[in-house]
Every structure is written in C-alpha cells, then in structure tokens.
C-alpha cells in the first residue's frame, strides 16, 4: 500500500474518532448545563476573556427589598438608574419575585451545590433591606436620608460608598457567626447597630453626629482608637 494511501486512511480514522468524541462531549455538556452546573470539560483560566452570558431583568418599582437565599447566594445591591437584577442566564428562570405592599421579595437560588449564584440588584433609591440566608453580600453607593438593614444568617456583609443621614443595622442571629464590614468610604450621620451572636465587626468609620451600639459580648470590634472613642456601647 502506498504511503499516501496510508496517510489518508490514518487521517480519516482520526477525524472519525474526533467526531464521535466531540459529539459525546457535547451531549455531556448539555446535561451539565441542564443540571445548572459548569461543564465538566471546561477549563478555568483566571486570565481568560471568557465571560458567562448575563441576563438583566427589569423589576417593579420598590423602596423596600427582601432577599431570601436558597443555597450559596452572593448578592450586590447598588444604586442604579433602573430597578433591575443581573445574573447568569442559567439563573434567570430560577428567580422568583412578588410584591408585599411596597416591598419587593426576591427568592434567589445558588448556581449549584458547589457554586454560588451571583446576583447584582440595582435601584435608584432604597429605604429598607431584609436579608435572609445569603453569603457574600455588599450594599454600595446609596445616598439616603435613612437606610435600615436587617440581616438573618448573612456572612459576610459589607457596606461601602454610601452617604446616609442615618444608618440602622440589625443582625439578630444569636447562633450565627458574623462578619460585618462598614468601610471608611461611607459617610454616616447617625449610626445605630444592634448585633447579637458571635463574630467580628470591622468599623472603619462611625456616625459623625451620633452613635448608638448594642453589641453582643461575643462580637469582636475592630476599629481605631479614634473611632472607639466616638462609640456609645450598651
């Protein structure tokens, strides 16, 4: 048999094998996608330019927001020009929402048992936030006369770049370990904190006009001496 014939046969066999392998991997990838998890054949490269498909849903107008997490849920709540929520397209069909008077209730799920569902919620203005069972949670960039946040089973919780006449934070989980981070990029007139349970409060700024803190003895306060002098602890 001529060498050229052998080469053609080899190339043809290789193409057939690759075709069958590609079809099998495609089927497995579709199964993984349907199950709500990344493909087992994908390669994670932190320097890659790949980005997941992102979907934005327009939300009804609200001034109060309640989030109920199921599984690993990471949330950013930020000031924006519209009432909306952004997430991976896979998560879009899992979002549940309903209004309770002026409060929007969002039920959000994790991406899978191993991977967090990541959501970004935008609103032009916000007065009251209730958080239930979320992991990494960030509230940023709001300018309000008053903002109240109530957290149940949230770890960690960060507040940054907010300008607030009064900020009230209630963390009422007496059995949960907490990490609360109030950044120096905030400007707060009156600061009211009611924190139970155990954990850490990182306080990089305090209320310029007044501070009223009711803090569990099991909460470690990380703050400079200057800030500690401004606090009224109960």
Image: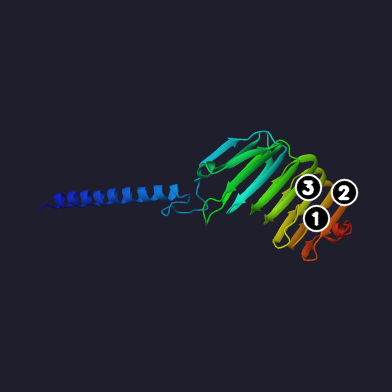
The CA span between labels 2 and 1 is 18 Å
Write the residue at 67% across / 51% down.
Answer: 132
Classed neighbour count for the residue bearing mark 2: other residues with Cα under 10 Å, few (<14), some (14–19), many (≥20)? few
Which badge, 2 or 1, is on the more N-terminal residue? 1
Which residue is labeled 3 in the image?
186
Which residue is labeled 2 in the image?
208
Closer to the camera in the image, 199 or 161: 199
Q: Secondary structure at mark 1?
A: strand
Write the residue at 14% across / 49% down.
Answer: 5
Viewed as shown, does residue 48 lie left or right of 119? left
Looking at the picture, does residue 204 appear above or below residue 218?
A: above
Question: Residue 30: x, y in percent?
Answer: 40, 47
Q: Secondary structure at mark 2?
A: loop
Which badge, 1 or 3, is on the more N-terminal residue? 3
Camera-side mark, 1 or 3: 1
Extreme residue toward the front, this view: 100
Question: Residue 159: x, y in percent?
Answer: 73, 49
Q: Are marks 1 and 3 in contact (CB under 8 Å)?
A: no
Classed neighbour count for the residue bearing mark 1: other residues with Cα under 10 Å, few (<14), some (14–19), many (≥20)? some
Q: Which mark is residue 194?
A: 1
- The picture quadrant where one finds residue 85 is top right
Q: Are marks 2 and 3 in contact (CB under 8 Å)?
A: no
Closer to the camera in the image, 113 or 180: 113
Which badge, 2 or 3, is on the more N-terminal residue? 3
Viewed as shown, does residue 222 lie left or right of 36? right
Closer to the camera in the image, 63 or 38: 63
Q: Secondary structure at mark 3?
A: loop
Colour pattern of the rendering: rainbow
Closer to the camera in the image, 62 or 86: 62
The CA span between labels 1 and 3 is 18 Å
């Amino acid at each position: 048999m001529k060498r050229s014939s052998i080469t053609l046969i080899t190339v043809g066999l290789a193409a057939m094998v690759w075709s069958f392998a590609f079809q099998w991997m495609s089927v497995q990838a579709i199964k993984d996608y349907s199950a709500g998890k990344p493909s087992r054949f994908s390669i994670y490269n932190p320097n890659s330019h790949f980005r997941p498909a992102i979907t934005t849903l327009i939300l009804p107008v609200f001034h109060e927001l309640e989030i109920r997490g199921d599984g690993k849920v990471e949330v950013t709540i930020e000031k924006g020009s519209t009432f909306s929520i952004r997430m991976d397209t896979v998560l879009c069909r899992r979002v549940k929402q309903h209004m309770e008077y002026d409060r929007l209730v969002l039920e959000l799920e994790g991406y899978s048992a191993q991977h967090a569902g990541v959501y970004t919620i935008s609103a032009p203005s916000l007065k009251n936030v209730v958080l239930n069972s979320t992991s990494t949670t960030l509230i940023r960039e709001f300018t309000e006369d008053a903002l109240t946040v109530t957290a149940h089973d949230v770890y960690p919780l960060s507040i940054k770049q907010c300008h607030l006449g009064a900020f009230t934070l209630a963390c009422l989980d007496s059995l949960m370990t907490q990490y609360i981070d109030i950044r120096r990029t905030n400007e707060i007139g009156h600061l009211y904190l009611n924190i139970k349970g155990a954990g850490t409060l990182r306080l990089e700024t305090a209320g310029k006009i007044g501070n009223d803190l009711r803090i569990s003895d099991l909460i470690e306060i990380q703050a400079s001496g200057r800030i500690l002098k401004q606090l009224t602890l109960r």
